[in-house]
Amino acid sequence: MTSEPSLIKNRSSIMGTEKRETLLLSIESTFSKMDPARRVEEAVHEHIKGNSGGDIYAIGFGKASLSMYIGLRRALTGKIKKAMITVPEGIEQTDRWVELELLHGTHPRVSEKSCSSTGRILDLIRGLKKSDILVTLISGGGSALFEYPENWITVNEMADISDCLMGNGANIKELNAIRIAMSQVKGGKLLTKTGAGKIYDFLISDVPGDDPALIASGPLVQPKIDRKQTLDIIGRYIGNCPGLKKVSRNYSYSPIPSSEWDRIHTSIIERNSDFIGAFMEKFTENGFPAISIGSGLSGNVIEFSSWIVEKAREIYKTEKKPFWFVGGGETTSRIVGKGKGGRNCELALRVMQKFSNEEFLFSSIGTDGMDGNSGAMGGIADNDLKDKVTNNEIEDSLSRSDSFSLLDKYSSAIITGFTGTNVSDIIIGYYGGPKH
């Protein structure tokens, strides 16, 4: 009997302890259960099967879009006339299907490559008729992978403005408002590019609160921001981001008629909280006490690490017994060196640093399998590792943003490669109280 290939490529070398084994098995089980292909297949059977009288076309963009397409193809065997999917460079299809054209774009910075692929998709959907059905498969990363600038701005100017806004603390809503102003396809504008009579919009959420308007900047979602609000945002940042002067001069706002939105059926098929629920279910099945600390967690890794350590101690005082805990969201970290790492690897080290003579395990993972520039999904830290590593090693690693190298040296970095999904980050931990 042949076993399924392991998601975690270095599983045997990082397992080490019984608790690590529990962690790694829970990761593999949850990612299998939450496979985007399976979730799309279920959604299609619910919403499209039996309602597909016209020709069916499919487009997609984002880190999970190829995985999503696999499920769509399974559910609609032989019924898809043409499909185009844009994924990050480095993701390739294993199987070659005659109807699918796999395109590539760049992430996290948009480029001409992304715009060229978007142009190919627009050429396809412009020719669709009222009798045709369009299925869209959208996931995190889509903002950079799917883009077509307004005629008055270049893609490099768009990228520079986005970088400047992020560097000056703009939140996701402010960033999206400016992206919509500069784009021909964001903020519902994609709807104006096709005559398809029915559009099924399947989304995987990587944003706090799971607002469809924020996922890949909502290409098929009615925007919740108007011209005045957008101009107010421009005004707040124009002093630090002079490129916004061009946006302010040229931006125009044309609401899409309300009747047009009736063509779209939108479904979020997977989100961060679904992963938390699946992890909780797995721990419960195996008889382990487990507590959810919720989705939408955020904050700088320095402050967040202190919070999570105190949270574990508080729960232990109430529960009076060891427990596992699961949460999700997205922290932030500041790059201070030229090492290899990301927010998840750094968070694992900082949490380990703050626990003292206690029994613990902590892991933070990026669900897309890519934590910063590390090439890892994330890291594991526990009291066994803390006994091996000196505080000087940890401080040196953090001072160079080199968290991955230290974790990898001690067989504590989780390597998966691209997972085919993207719902922000997940933290999984175990706390057993003070060591006796």
Image (tube, helix red, strand yellow):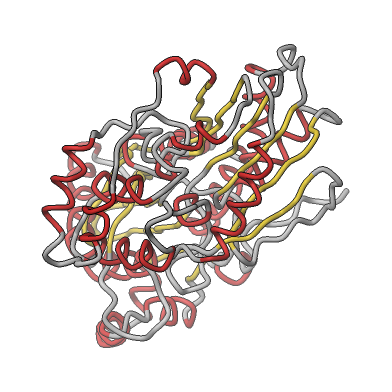
Q: Quadrant of residue 273?
A: top left
Q: Count the numbered circles shown.
A: 0
Q: Quadrant of residue 271?
A: top left
Asked if residue 28 lies left or right of residue 267, the reply is right
Residue 238 in the image, given as x and y percentages of width and height? 15, 60
Q: Quadrant of the C terminus?
A: bottom left
Asked if residue 278 lies left or right of residue 55, the reply is left
- Regarding residue 20, the answer to whether it shows in the image is yes
* Residue at 56% from the left image edge and 42% from the top image edge: 30
Check the image and report above or below for 436 versus 335.
above
- Regarding residue 379, the answer to whether it shows in the image is no
Residue 266 in the image, given as x and y percentages of width and height? 50, 25
Residue 231 in the image, given as x and y percentages of width and height? 17, 45
Residue 347 in the image, given as x and y percentages of width and height? 31, 64
Asked if residue 377 lies left or right of residue 175, the reply is right
Query: 199 or 231: nearer the eye?
Result: 231
* Residue at 40% from the left image edge and 17% from the top image edge: 258
